[in-house]
Every structure is written in C-alpha cells, then in structure tokens.
Amino acid sequence: MPLALLTYALGLGERKRHFPAPQPLQKRYDVLIIGAGGHGLACAYHLAKDHGITKTIVIDKGYLGGGNTARNTTIVRANYLTEEGTAFYKESLALFENLSQELDLNTMYSKRGHLTLAHTDAALRTARWRAEVNKHLGVRSEVVGRHELRKICPQLNLSDEVRFPVLGALYHAPGAIARHDAVAWGYARAAYRRGVEILQNTEATGFQVERGRVVGVRTSRGTITAAKVVQAVAGHSSVLAHKLGIRLPIRTVPLQACVSQPYQPFLDPIVVSGSLHVYISQSARGEFVMGGATDPAELYDTRSTLEFKEQLMMHILELFPQLANANLLRQWAGLADMTPDFSPVMGKTPVKNYYIDAGWGTWGFKATPVCGKRMAECVATDKTPALLKPFALSRFDDFDLVGEKGAASVGH
Amino acid sequence: MPCPIHGERNIAEFFCKGPVLSMPNATRGTRQQWARYLFLAENKAGIVDEWWLHSPSSLWFVARRDTTSDEILQTWTIEAYRTQQQKKTTPKATPKATSKTTTR
C-alpha cells in the first residue's frame, strides 16, 4: 500500500497542496515540455529521476491532465499484434503495476482481465495470431472458446439469438484499469518534488529557431528559452508541429465515450469487441465506462453525437441485455491522433533539439509510463532508444510502417 | 449533408473519404512526394475540401467543411468542382491534376 494512503487513513500528517503556486520563470531551461498530460509529466519525471535533468518546465494551455489524459477509458493492456507494439506495451504494463509505489499515490490500478471478443472466423484467426505473438514475447494471452468464456464472464450474453453471436475471445489476464487523473497528478507531484516546474494556462504560440535548431518557445506568457523542446499535446499535434514546418502522419478524429450512473459491482473483466466497435468495463465507483469507434470524419471539436450513442448501445445491449435500463450519466469526447498504421510517433524530428510524442490515437493512456521513460532517455541522450526506433517519424518517408491492428476503436 | 444531387440527406448515409489532394505523377513522382500524398496529411484545423461518398447511390462529390465546427459550407458535383477550380487564376489541387504535382 502506498505510504501516503496509509498515513492519510490513520490520520497522521497533514494534507499538503500537491502543487504550489507557480514561481517566477527562470531565464533558461534545459528542457521545455509542451503539454502537461500524463505523457509530458511522465517524461519530466523520468528526465529528473533517471537522468538528473531537473531544470525542466512543463507548460499546458489548459490545466494539468485536462486533455486526453482525463478523457480516455483507462484500459491498460499489452496484447498487441506487432512485435514492436507488444514489446513496448509489455514494458508499460510492468511500470504500471508498480506505479502507485513509485509515485506514492494510489493510482487504483486494478487487474481485471481483458477479453477481445470474436464474432467471425476471421476475428478468431486474428485473436490466435495475437495470442501467439504475445506468448512468444512473454505476454500472457490466450484464445478462449465459449465454454471458458462463460466461466470468465458469466454476465456476457452468449446466446445465438443475436445479430453477431460470440464465437470466442482473446483473453489477456493482465489487462487492467487505473485512475487516469491519479496517474497525471502522481507524475506531476513526483516531478515537482524533483525540481520540475509546471505552468498551466500557458499556450505555446510559436517557436524560436536558429539555424535549424529550436532555441525557445513563444507562449501566451512570453518567450521561454530552452535547450531542448518536447511536444506532447495529443489532439493538437499537427497544428503545433505545423508551426515548425513539420508535417505529421496524423488525422485528428474525435473519439467519444460515456459512463452510466454507478451500479453495484457486476462486471469484473474488461470486454471489448473490435467487430462491434464497443468496449465496456466497470469502474471502482461502479460506473460502466463505455466507448466505441472513432468518429467518421476529421474534426477538432469534442462535441457528442446521437449517432455514436445509438451505434454503441445497439451493440452493448446485445452483449449485456441486463443494462437495458441503465442510465447514462456523462459523455464526452477526446481528440485522437490517428496514424495510418495505428502506431505512435515518438523521438527525434527533422528540427534539431525538437522531440515529438504524438500519434497516440486510441492507445495513449496505457503507454504513459513507458513513453515518459523512453522519451526522457531519447531527450537526455539525443539517441533513439531501441524500443522507440520502430516508431520514428521518418518511417513514413521510408515506407516502413508498423501496421498495428491490435489497436482499439479501429476497424480491421 | 446537402448532397449536390439528392439535396439534404441524413449524414449517416455519407462517408468522408479524406481531403482533396493532387496525386503525384505516377511515373515521375518522387518517394517524398508519394509519402506526403499517402501519409503526411496537412490535418488542417479550419476549412478543407473533402471527398464524400453518398453510399446508397455510390455518388462521389466534394464538400467544403470547417473541421473546427463540423459545419458543411458548400458541396459540388465533381464536374462543378473541377470547373470552379479551373476558373481560379492559380489552379491548385484539382481532383485529377495530371501534369505537374502540387503537393501542398
């Protein structure tokens, strides 16, 4: 149990502010990170912890963890299809498991088991493929039939009297959920304790470039000079990179999600169906967290639509008819950076001293710890770590895509 | 969606097929031009011209949409769009530019 939780429960020690008020800006920073979401903060934390770089500032145009970090559906898993993806997320899962201890903040990491349902022979084949790749790389995944499925998730409707009967599933026992806000706050606090500054309500409006090198960032509070700059701004990646003349392989598409009102604990595993474009899990609070496919067209707006809810509920009710009378409590959308190969873009860019962390489509939250750690390594050493190499921006110029079809919310 | 042939129809009948881009020359286009055309989208936050498909009738047409508000500003049949593009003094990004590539 994290020490902070124990002392709080026992009424020992006083509650302190997590983050003190911002201090006057320093003249020059070693690293400036644009975007105070999970990824940017994790990078700042690992720069300080692993590489001793503490003269770092993290800026955000909104508030801390207020973008996609707060908008995802908190699923953590490593059962991807490509070797590159699986190896990457395997490390992330390992870091997640120890995150509450590491950050001394309860991230409410809860191992539930993750089911990817198959409704067709083709989907079952893909499940088998994913399971074999996973096993080969030491990630626990297996294909289960209807009989085992009934034991793992007795709540699931396995009737044949539906439009798309369930044939089997890919079962990924380490699949988990975590509290996304706590992840962002935990990294922010841990980074702050090591000397990192965090400046909210500060938008990056442009860059200072000298001879092909970034030397500073123009912000709504004036220009900040920094030796290295990292971009981790999720849905607005293209717009920001464009200011430096960098074109990204990204289309910005909204991804909508919703939660029901809280109910008694009913559903333990996380249930996903790629063919039906739905995923559902029950949070520790009892809310059903549900999401579906990305929106059909590019859009820089987080509105919600009736089409999304109709589509989603049509399929959810086939899988869980028990939820027919459940009430929706909240709905929202996040801006997803969709890449042509459903894989992220990380590492160096054509502009010297400028590093990018983008293209996180529907797979960003679960990568928070590993991405922070490896991006920090990349920034500190100016060398691309082996784990990030397959995800370089240059792969699009070289026609060397990754082809991750184990990603969520995308049609296969 | 105000379809240029069928009039106003439910948006669920349509599919967005991405921005109107000029394709690099099939034989002379460089790798970099093709990479740009295929992968490196401008992904503009603002007004863009896009291909749309009316699925029930298989009709392809062009719609001008604001990607910050999802507002559809204007639609054209392919012929009308091409004519309108050619009328401009500096023609760019016509649907079937065959000669010089103008990758944006």
Image (tube, coloured by chain):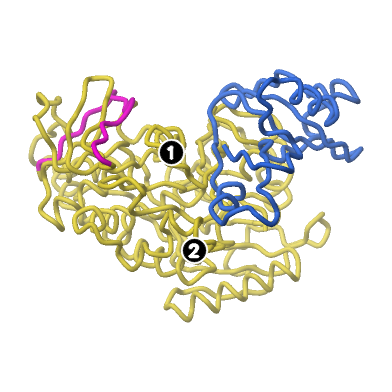
Foreground label between 1 and 2: 1
Asked whether A111 or A117 is in front, the reply is A117
Which residues lie in the magenta part? A195-211
Question: Dot 2: few (<14), some (14–19), or many (≥20) neighbours within 10 Å?
Answer: many
Task: Name the image quarter holding residue A305.
Answer: top right
- In this rendering, the answer to whether A49 lies above or below A256 is below
Q: Chain of mark 1?
A: A
Task: Name the image quarter holding residue A19.
Answer: top left
Determine which residue is flagged by label 2: A113
Asked whether B95 or A51 is in front, the reply is B95
Q: Total marks drawn?
A: 2
- Chain letter, colour yellow in render: A
Which numbered marker is on residue A237?
1
Where in the figure is residue A144, as x and y percent of width and height? 62, 74
Q: Residue at 50% x, 56% y: name it.
A: A397
Q: CA distance from mark 1 to mark 2?
A: 32 Å
Quadrant location of the N terminus of chain A? bottom left
- In this rendering, the answer to whether A218 lies above or below A173 is above
